[in-house]
Every structure is written in structure tokens, then in C-alpha cells.
Amino acid sequence: MSGQMSKEEVKKLFNEFDNGNGHLSLAEIDRAITHRYPQLGTNKKAIMRAYKEADSSGNGFVELREFRKIIQLLHHYDELSKLFEELDTNDDHRISYPEFKKGFSLLGEDDTDEQFLRKEFNSIDTNRGGYILFDEFCMYMAKRKVN
């Protein structure tokens, strides 16, 4: 699955995923990706995040007009999920400050100033839970990409 598909290829893939009602539920997308693209199918966090973002109408389904976006987002969030997993060295599905500090260079940064790192960590931890969750990490990486 590539983000650079023609309109015809996108429509054909949508029809493969669709059960015939013209829109895709999360279950349809998950099942199709798991079956057709097993390399992405195991990454449930990426699938869920891409699904939520692609549903621009907010109706809980992905229609054909939103489908190209989910294809692009799946690749993007799959890559972010892999990076998140590298930072999450104890595999508890969240990044602690020590993990963040140790892995900050994985984000392409070399600043090791303790005050800066703590401030950066706290800005990512928007729910103030003391850990960075995947959604918070995605938001942070999106802001970094824009700036």
C-alpha cells in the first residue's frame, strides 16, 4: 500500500475493503489491513490513529473521499509507532522521562541540557500523567514537522 496511488487504484482498494455499503468501519479497515498488509496489521496504534484522523466528517466511518488520507496516514503513524517503541525501552506503552532523556537523540536532537529536556518532556505530556502516551507523541512530532 503506497501513499502515491492513482484515483483508480484508491477506488479499487476501497472497494476491496468495503462490505458493500460505501463506507468503512474501523473493523473493516483493521481486518483488511491485517489480511492484505500484515506488516501494518500488527500496529493497532497506527491503524487507530490513522482511522480517527482520516474520518474528517466525524461520522465514525471512512468514505471513499477520505480513503486516500488513511493510506498516507497509515504509513506515517506506522513510522511514528516504531520510533515510539524504540523510546519505550521497557515496553509499557508509554515513555517515562528517563526513557525520553536516554532516547532523545533518536528524535534527531543532540541537546542534553537537563532543563531543556525536562521542559520538552513536560510540553509533550499534555495530560500531566508523568508519561508520554502515543497520542501525545504523535501530536509532538506533528508540531516538530510544522516548525
Image: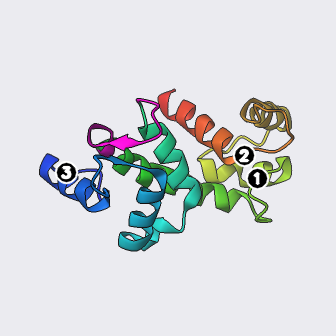
Tag 2 secondary structure: loop
Residue 140 pos. (x, y %): 62, 35
Q: Pointer 1: what residue?
A: 94
Can residue 5 be seen here? no
Q: The disc labelled 3 sits on which kind of residue?
A: Lys
Is residue 63 highlighted in magenta?
Answer: yes
Q: Position of 143 compared to 134: left or right? A: left
* Rendering colour mode: rainbow
Q: Position of 24 compared to 78: left or right? A: left
Tag 1 secondary structure: loop
Quadrant of the image occupied by residue 61:
top left
**Residue at the image position 47 percent from the left and 46 percent from the top:** 51
Can residue 13 be seen here? yes
Crowd rating for badge 1 (residues with CA inside 10 Å; few <14, some 14–19, many 20+): many
Q: Pointer 3: what residue?
A: 11
Q: Are marks 2 and 1 in contact (CB under 8 Å)?
A: yes
Sequence-wise first label, 1 or 3: 3
| Residue positioned most to the left | 8
Identify which residue, 23 or 123, lies in the foreground: 23
Crowd rating for badge 2 (residues with CA inside 10 Å; few <14, some 14–19, many 20+): some
Residue 16 pos. (x, y %): 26, 62
Dot label at residue 133: 2
Dot label at residue 53: none
What distance separates the C-alpha of mark 2 from that of mark 1? 5 Å
Residue 99 pos. (x, y %): 79, 54
Identify which residue, 123 or 134, lies in the foreground: 134
Q: Position of 43 compared to 117: left or right? A: left
What distance separates the C-alpha of mark 1 from that of mark 3? 36 Å
Residue 104 pos. (x, y %): 70, 48
